Image (tube, grey):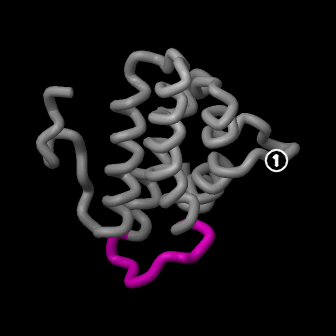
Amino acid sequence: MNYETARKLLIDQTIATQDYPDALLERMKHGKPPVPGQITSILLALKVVFEALKDAPTLDRELALALYQLSIKTQHLFAAGRKVGIDWPPLLKEDLLRISLGAESIFSGTWQNLASVGFEKL
């Protein structure tokens, strides 16, 4: 996966379009879990974008918004879904934390993982 593909994948996960109706945010808004492989693709894309931008002084607004939405809005949707009784997949909470850490890594320029922030025992 190259940078442009990874960037597009991350942005596509935040808005449902005719070409891509299974955006993660849209699925979660409707109480649906991610499609198989979706989280893995997002995590890979985050790593590719991190590697491409780790020394960049700025980020483009569209990518920054997508990173924010993937890291914050997914957490809110997860919590709201739990409150109304949605039975999310067992590892989704940890996967969403990994997505948040990947987004934080892109903003900070230093790669974060569960162990580096003290969550290795989730």
Q: Which residue is drawn at 36% across and 51% down?
A: 102
**Residue 62 or 7: which is nearer the viewer?**
62
Residue 111 vertical position relative to residue 53 in the rendered view, above or below: above
**Residue 96 or 2: which is nearer the viewer?**
96
Q: Is residue 56 magenta?
A: yes
Residue 19 vertical position relative to residue 121 in the rendered view, above or below: below
Q: Residue at label 1?
A: 17
* Quarter of the figure with residue 107: bottom left
Residue 27 picture location, percent across and down: 67, 33
Q: Residue at x 62, y 38 (%)?
A: 24
* Quarter of the figure with residue 81: top right
What quarter of the picture does the C terminus occupy?
A: top left
Residues packed near mark 1 inside 10 Å, few (<14), some (14 to 19) or many (20 plus): few
Type of secondary structure dominating the magenta stretch: loop
Residue 31 picture location, percent across and down: 63, 26
**Type of amino acid under label 1:** Thr
**Residue 74 or 53: which is nearer the viewer?**
74
**112 sits to left or right of 59:** left
- Looking at the rendering, the stretch of residues picked out in magenta corresponds to 54-63
